[in-house]
Structure formats: structure tokens, C-alpha cells
Image (spheres, helix red, strand yellow):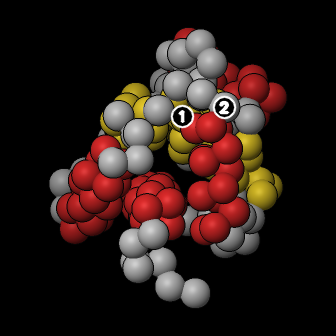
Amino acid sequence: MRFTLFCIGKMKAGADKELFDRYLDRARKTGRGLGVTEVALQETPESRAQRPDDRKADEARTLLQGLGTGARLVVLDENGKNLTSPAFTQKLEAWKDEGVPEVVFAIGGADGHGQEALARADLKLALGAMTWPHQIARILLAEQIYRAMTIQSGHPYHRV
């Protein structure tokens, strides 16, 4: 199984990016022993369309064009499900057990996701009721992916 973080926009160098990279690196190392072959980042520029709905539609098309056969799509959305870390882990484990080749986690642009992406999503996931800047959402998502792997492996990182 492969995990891909698909993000609209590019994260700038600095403390946020260093923390994000640290969690991504931890996930990559921990994932190897769990059958996760890769944890990849795919950044794509924001659409240049003038209207928000057009931007969202352009960005959704870009996301969906790159979606591989059999991939599961998780879109981060303020109206999505609030899962506990163990429940998130169970979802990823179930997909792995089903033989899903890839899980794509999508963080949309400033305007959110287009309707096509939302309609295609296998899971709409919220990172809580608050709104987060995209840089922090990336860090939180990378940390939760790493945490899910530590839960799967029985590592004491996740304490209840």
C-alpha cells in the first residue's frame, strides 16, 4: 500500500516544513515494516481561475486525473468525519486488508474542494471543528498517518 498526500500549493521552507518533513520521514520508516511501500507528497499549484468555483473545479480535475485505479480518496473537509486516532487507524488497516493499492489524502486550496472531488471521496475527514491553516493541516495529517502506523505496530508513541 502507498500513501500520497496531495496538496494544493507549495509549503515554504521554515519550521512548519521541517516539522512536516520529520513526520513524513517517521511515517516512511515505520511504514516499511507494515507493508506501506511509500509515503509520498504531491504538490500542485493553485488554479489561476478567477472565480472560486472555477478554481475548485480545476483543482478537483487535477486531483482526480492523477488518481490511480483502485485508490481510496480521503479529502480533508471541515464538514467531514471527526475520527479518533484508533478509528482512523482501523480505516487504514481495513483498506490494506482489502488490498487497496493507494490511499490519497487531499488537502484542497484556499477555497476548499470542488464538487467532483467531494463526490468521489471515499472518506471526508475533518481535523476537528476548528479551521486550520494549510501548513498546520499538513503537519496534523502527517502526524496522524505516523501515529496510525505506530498504533498498528504496537509502538508506545500513542498512549491512551
Q: Could you tell whether 72 is left or right of 10 in the image?
A: right
Q: Nearer the viewer, residue 78 or 33?
A: 33
Q: Amino acid at mark 2?
A: Glu
Whether pointer 1 and pointer 2 mark residues with C-beta atoms closer than 8 Å, the reply is no
Earlier-in-chain disc, 1 versus 2: 2
Q: Amino acid at mark 1?
A: Val
Q: Position of residue 132 (x, y in %)?
A: 55, 65
Of tags 1 and 2, the one toward the viewer is 2
Q: Nearer the viewer, residue 113 or 1?
A: 1
Could you give the CA–CA distance between mark 1 and mark 2, rounded to whole angstroms? 16 Å
Q: Nearer the viewer, residue 44 or 2?
A: 2
Residue 14 seen in the figure: yes
Q: Position of residue 74 (x, y in %)?
A: 64, 40
Disc number for residue 87: none
Read off the residue under disc 2.
98
Q: Nearer the viewer, residue 130 or 49?
A: 130
Which corner quadrant of the image does residue 43 belong to? top left
Q: Position of residue 77 (x, y in %)?
A: 69, 50
Q: Position of residue 149 (x, y in %)?
A: 45, 58
Label 1 neighbourhood size at 10 Å, few (<14), some (14-19), many (20+)? Answer: many
Read off the residue under disc 1.
104
Q: Secondary structure at mark 1?
A: strand
Q: Secondary structure at mark 2?
A: loop
